[in-house]
Image (cartoon, helix red, strand yellow):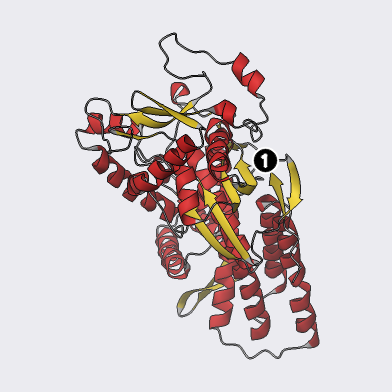
């Protein structure tokens, strides 16, 4: 099968047909969190999006190797260790564990490897030494810096020239760097800081070098896709390109993908504005599966506005998908023997158009917004067409189609049937009590609420029965 997936490449600023280095295989790296706190809603967007990229590529038949790192050596971690009165290693362990709690709740699958800086120090030191040997880096008093002017293509990812960068730079008189643009590969140990032995003395890695070392170790010198938030393009990803390509002489990544920013109530998220939310904060009020679907409701390169009203709207949309799934399961449980007719075969063939629309959307630079639209078209068609008289083959085809598409986006994957049954029975009991109390307004309200969930109540001699529609 010829695949024509288009990816917007940040390196070239245009959509390009995806052609992996090895046919049928994809090597993919996405920057993970610095583990000094719970991750925030802005971090969640790339974590969720690149999880979907991986799922979709696998759905399209690729064998994907996906790496997402943990930065467990950083100034922020050291500062947090002082605040909490524990070691930097304990801070990292604590928030790596907490990352997985929130990531699991968001439906983010584990990467093939989650490497840590602290576990890859020999590889980092070797890469730094390679750059020194090639005169692309230099040591000054225990610190090692990358010599930016030794890499003529510096700025090609962020579209900044060396001249523009120099014009905007500032340097202190006491600065030991040869050039204000040079950046740290290895930092000399400060009093009380975590450190490792190196050829340049006791110290620890700079931020950017870790990803170059991990990509090389786990995926090789060149990979297919490198991703992260748009805020990482400069300096982090720009410096990765310089380090990796300076050391190997080979292209680091053929496709660079960057997601857009998140605004909170139409304002940029920031601690100073008091609109800074961790995923853990949001989980106090909303199911995180709803948050996942919300973050997929806009194209990944577009900014997205986060508000309670929009999340509540998404909550209702997700419920519509679950209602359709639960209704199909209910109808299948009836074990009806309706005959399979020619019109049923036509309908099964007809609903394949939604899969085609879904694939067309995702092939076009992973347009999850249009992919969701295709799913909702399918849901509307299912609700309008299927009932208790539908043949089992029709029910199974509709269920398979819906589950296939929602699984790619990682939504509506919970088994909510038992929970819904208990909720329905509780509401029926509440309605019965309202009728006894002659509170007919409340009884009618509960009936209408259940009807909105596609549940019809029937008052019989044997008590209240309900059925799904």
**165 displayed left or right of 183:** right
As drawn, 2 above or below 296? below
Residue 452 visible in the displayed image: no
Q: Nearer the viewer, residue 242 or 305?
A: 242
**Within-10-Å neighbours for mark 1: few <14, some 14–19, many 20+:** some
As drawn, 114 above or below 329? above
Answer with the quarter of the image where residue 406 lies: bottom right
Q: Quadrant of the C terminus?
A: bottom right
Answer with the quarter of the image where residue 282 lies: top left
Q: Residue furthest left?
A: 85
Residue 52 visible in the displayed image: yes
Residue 74 in percent (x, y) is at: 36, 34
**283 displayed left or right of 227:** left
Q: Label 1 belongs to which residue?
A: 10
The structure residue drawn at horizontal position 51% and vertical position 32%, both measured from the top left corner, is: 135
The structure residue drawn at horizontal position 75% and vertical position 43%, both measured from the top left corner, is: 14
């Amino acid at each position: 099968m010829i695949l024509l997936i288009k990816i917007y490449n940040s390196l070239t600023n245009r959509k390009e047909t995806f052609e992996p280095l090895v046919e049928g295989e994809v090597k993919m790296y996405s920057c993970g969190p610095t583990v000094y706190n719970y991750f925030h809603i802005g971090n969640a967007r790339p974590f969720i999006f690149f999880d979907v990229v991986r799922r979709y590529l696998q759905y399209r038949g690729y064998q994907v190797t996906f790496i997402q790192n943990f930065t467990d050596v950083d100034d922020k971690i050291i500062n947090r260790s002082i605040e909490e009165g524990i070691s930097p290693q304990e801070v990292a362990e604590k928030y790596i564990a907490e990352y997985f709690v929130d990531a699991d709740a968001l439906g983010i699958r584990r990467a093939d490897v989650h490497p840590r800086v602290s576990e890859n120090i020999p590889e980092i030191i070797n890469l730094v030494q390679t750059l020194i040997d090639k005169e692309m880096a230099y040591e000054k008093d225990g610190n090692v810096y990358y010599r930016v002017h030794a890499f003529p293509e510096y700025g090609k990812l962020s579209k900044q020239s060396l001249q523009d960068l120099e014009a905007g730079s500032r340097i202190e008189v006491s600065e030991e760097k040869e050039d204000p643009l040079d950046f740290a590969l290895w930092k000399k140990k400060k009093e009380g800081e975590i450190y490792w032995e190196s050829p340049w003395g006791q110290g620890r890695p700079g931020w950017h070098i870790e990803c170059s070392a991990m990509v090389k170790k786990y995926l090789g010198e060149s990979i297919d896709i490198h991703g992260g938030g748009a805020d990482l393009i400069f300096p982090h990803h720009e410096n990765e390109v310089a380090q990796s390509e300076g050391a190997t002489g080979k292209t680091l990544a053929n496709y660079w993908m960057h997601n857009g920013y998140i605004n909170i109530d139409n304002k940029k998220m920031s601690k100073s504005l008091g609109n800074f939310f961790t995923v853990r904060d949001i989980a106090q009020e909303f199911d995180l599966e709803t948050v996942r679907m919300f973050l997929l409701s806009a194209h990944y390169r577009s900014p997205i506005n986060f508000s309670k009203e929009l999340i509540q709207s998404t909550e209702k949309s997700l419920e519509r998908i679950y209602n359709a799934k639960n209704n199909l399961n209910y109808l299948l449980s009836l074990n009806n023997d309706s005959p399979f007719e020619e019109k049923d075969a036509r309908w099964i063939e007809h609903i394949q158009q939604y899969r085609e629309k879904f694939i067309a959307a995702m092939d076009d630079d992973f347009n999850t917004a249009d992919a969701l639209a295709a799913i909702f078209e399918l849901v509307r068609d299912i609700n309008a067409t299927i009932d208790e008289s539908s043949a089992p083959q029709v029910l199974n085809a509709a269920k398979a189609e819906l589950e296939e598409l929602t699984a790619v986006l990682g939504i509506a994957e919970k088994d909510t049937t038992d929970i819904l049954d208990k909720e329905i029975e509780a509401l029926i009991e509440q309605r019965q009590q309202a009728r006894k109390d002659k509170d007919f307004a409340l009884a009618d309200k509960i009936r209408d609420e259940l009807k909105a969930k596609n549940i019809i109540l029937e008052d019989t001699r044997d008590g209240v029965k309900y059925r799904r529609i």
